[in-house]
Image: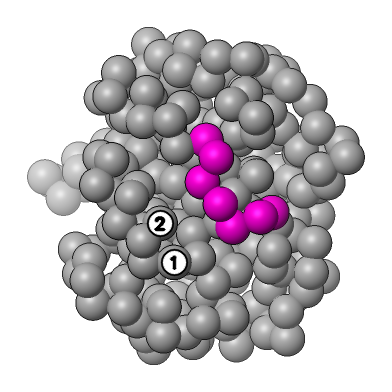
């Protein structure tokens, strides 16, 4: 399982929200590149970026900060938040990012998703962020619930050829009360796609539980910033299952 330490960006700073509430924002570092380098020094190979202003307004105000991270680290970089036009997709991928995560636009404009998948057919280059609130897919920076229930939307995405999904349980995000293990276990058993768990990863036991579900990835946010999870340890724990499977195949 891959570990994606996260940086949420607002006004050029690394911040965190509580359950997606913009009125409950904590600034952790005014230099996101510094945070990204800390991730890399701890052994991270991946980074998950979210432009919170983009998610709310459909713009790309933090792209220069994001470019600095891409240009000054060797991390596999994925970005979400406010990606609602093919021009924005182009801008991020041309800037050197490895993956673009589409959210609100997927719900409101299916043709946009089809266009992006056709233009960028490399598996995983176009991913979909599925943010769940009370069993429904949330949109517009988590402030609105769409008409889609979780299962209905997952089925729709797989039918369109989406291979990578970042799934967030909003009720768990930033709450430090543990990940929704039942949700991710159900999803991992039902769908043959790469699923990254997001929201509520609180301690190393969450990492172990998600690893055993054979998920593609897990995002670590607030737990890293508060010191509840040691990133280096989390990365090693996530590798264990991969090592075990390799050894089993060699026997």
Q: In the displayed structure, does residue 23 sit left or right of residue 233?
A: right
Q: Is residue 197 magenta?
A: no
In which image quadrant can residue 2 be found?
Answer: top left
59 or 158: nearer the eye? Answer: 59
Magenta-colored span: 56-62
Q: Which residue is mark 2?
A: 88
Q: Residue at x 62, y 15 (%)?
A: 30
Whether residue 238 appears in this view of the structure is no
In which image quadrant can residue 175 be found?
Answer: top right
231 or 50: nearer the eye? Answer: 50
In which image quadrant can residue 182 be found?
Answer: bottom right
Whether residue 147 appears in this view of the structure is yes
Residue found at the very far right of the displayed protein: 23
The dot on residue 85 is 1
Kindly report the secondary structure that dominates the magenta region of the rendered protein. loop
Q: Residue at x 69, y 63 (%)?
A: 140
Tag 2–tag 1 contact (CB < 8 Å) = yes
Q: Is residue 98 above or below residue 64?
A: below
Residue 239 in the image, given as x and y percentages of width and height: 35, 34
**Image quarter in which the N terminus is found:** top left
187 or 170: nearer the eye? Answer: 170
10 Å crowding of disc 2: few (<14), some (14-19), many (20+): some
Q: Is residue 239 above or below residue 68?
A: below
Q: Residue at x 37, y 23 (%)?
A: 68
Q: Secondary structure at mark 1?
A: loop
Q: Residue at x 87, y 36 (%)?
A: 24
Residue 115 in the image, given as x and y percentages of width and height: 31, 78
Q: Secondary structure at mark 2?
A: helix
């Amino acid at each position: 399982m891959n570990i994606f330490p996260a940086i949420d960006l607002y006004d050029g700073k690394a911040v965190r929200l509580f359950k997606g509430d913009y009125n409950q924002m904590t600034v952790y570092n005014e230099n996101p590149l510094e945070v990204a380098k800390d991730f890399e020094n701890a052994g991270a190979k991946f980074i998950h970026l979210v432009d919170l202003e983009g998610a709310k307004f459909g713009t790309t105000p933090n792209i220069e900060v994001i470019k600095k991270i891409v240009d000054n680290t060797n991390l596999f970089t994925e970005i979400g938040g406010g990606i609602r036009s093919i021009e924005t997709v182009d801008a991020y991928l041309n800037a050197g990012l490895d993956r673009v995560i589409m959210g609100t636009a997927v719900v409101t404009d299916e043709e946009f998703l089809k266009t992006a998948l056709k233009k960028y057919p490399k598996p995983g280059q176009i991913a979909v962020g599925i943010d769940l609130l009370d069993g429904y897919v949330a949109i517009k920076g988590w402030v609105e619930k769409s008409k889609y229930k979780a299962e209905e939307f997952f089925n729709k995405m797989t039918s369109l050829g989406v291979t990578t999904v970042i799934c967030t349980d909003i009720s768990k995000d930033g709450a430090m009360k543990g990940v929704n293990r039942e949700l991710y276990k159900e999803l991992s058993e039902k769908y043959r796609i790469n699923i990254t768990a997001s929201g509520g990863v609180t301690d190393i036991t969450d990492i172990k539980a998600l690893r055993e579900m054979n998920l593609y990835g897990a995002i670590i946010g607030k737990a890293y910033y508060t010191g509840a999870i040691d990133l280096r340890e989390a990365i090693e724990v996530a590798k264990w299952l991969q090592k075990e499977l390799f050894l089993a195949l060699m026997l």
